[in-house]
Image (cartoon, helix red, strand yellow):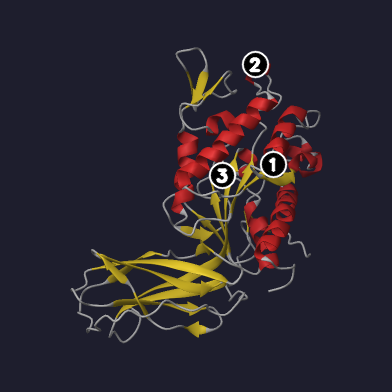
Amino acid sequence: MQRRLPRSADSPVPDAGPGPLAALVVVLMATLGAARLPAEPGADLGILAPRERQVIQRRTRAGGVIPVVVTGDVAAGTLVEARVVVAGEGAGAWHPLERDGERFRGALPAPAGGWHAVEIRRAGAAGPEAVVARVGVGEVFVVAGQSNSANHGEARLVPASDLVSSLAPDGTWRQAADPQPGASGDGGSFLPPLGDLLVERLAVPVGFVGCGIGATSVREWLPAGVPFPNPPTLEGRVRRRADGGWESDGAAFAMLVERMRGVGPEGFRAVLWHQGESDANQADPTRTLAGPLYEACLARVIRDSRAALGRDDPWFVARATYHVPGDESSPSIRAAQGAVCRDGLALSGPDTDALGAGSRDGGGKGVHFSAAGLVRHAEAWCDSIAPWLEERLGERPGER
């Protein structure tokens, strides 16, 4: 498989072009027998969903469903319609939306690929009255953990493909250029090159939801009130209990669940978890987390996030404990990360401890990744995700 070189954040972004399609449009929902009345003047329609550059998680290899929410001061009895303009194929039929108070809602089946457009009008209007020009149906991933899951890399990167987007905490989507919205830090991440690799291999748009927080222990990601015996090195997100133990304040967990919900009703493909350095081999050994406790904490985060969403979303867990040359791994934490995967609670992500000094910042002396290391990090994630996803979708590499 061809490997892409990282693009500097100062490099120009190539012009957008239509991405390859996985399949033709599937059967659209049946037309409702509502009366078609002329559009009244002066009542603008607004599209609340989808958003510009949004990636909708596909349901099957061939396609998915684009949720549509429209607002506007529309007279009673007036029909509001929506349609998909499929990239490379053209406009489909108009389909009615259901009135819900002052809003109109619907769901438009669409093929995997992008960018598609969604157009809105009142029945009888000469043409579209509101348009979202770029909507993708592809793969969406939530990315969480500590600094190497966030924007702490040595160089900011920009996707070479225009089909890689990121979701910001305010609900807007944009091209996934570093720094990633919603994650800590103002440097680089592995998401731009990972997005490029997945777009190239899967031939669909890719969306990311960055949630990583630098220097966090797994203890800080627990729901509020879950106890543990010893605090992490940084205590800003934990608190002492009356019994002398400790607990998380729950802020990181609440943020994670909120960002997961913010993706929309179609959800996401999987969570990519890269964390462990702040639990392993701490300078103060009383702040180090024992392997069995790490396993229990991470298992709790995974199970409780699934319960909060009411879905069993897949998680990929990396082996991640590297600090600096001479402190390159923690067998105890690595074993715990492996146990969560071996027990079937999560899937195995990459072993990034193997990305040693040659992939690290500060001339190989740091814990974060250099520009070249970010690309290697992305390649390792792609090698974990893509074969699993191709098997799940029932396809072979290169088959579309």
Q: Please identify the quadrant where the C terminus is shown.
A: bottom right
Q: Position of residue 346 (x, y in %)?
A: 65, 44
Residue drawn at x 67%, y 32% is 277
In the image, is 86 to the left or to the right of 159?
A: left
Q: Position of residue 268 (x, y in %)?
A: 54, 55
User: Residue under circle 1?
Assistant: 341
**Mark 2 and mark 3 in contact (Cβ < 8 Å)?**
no
- Residues under labels 2 and 1: Cα distance? 27 Å
Is residue 92 positioned above or below 349 on the image? below
- Residues under labels 3 and 2: Cα distance? 31 Å
Front residue of 132 and 398 = 398
User: Residue under circle 2?
Assistant: 286
Q: Position of residue 251 (x, y in %)?
A: 46, 34
- Disc 3 crowd rating (10 Å Cα; few below 14, some 14-19, many 20+) is some
Q: Amino acid at mark 2?
A: Thr
Is residue 355 positioned above or below 384 on the image? above
User: Residue under circle 3?
Assistant: 186
Front residue of 264 and 59 = 59
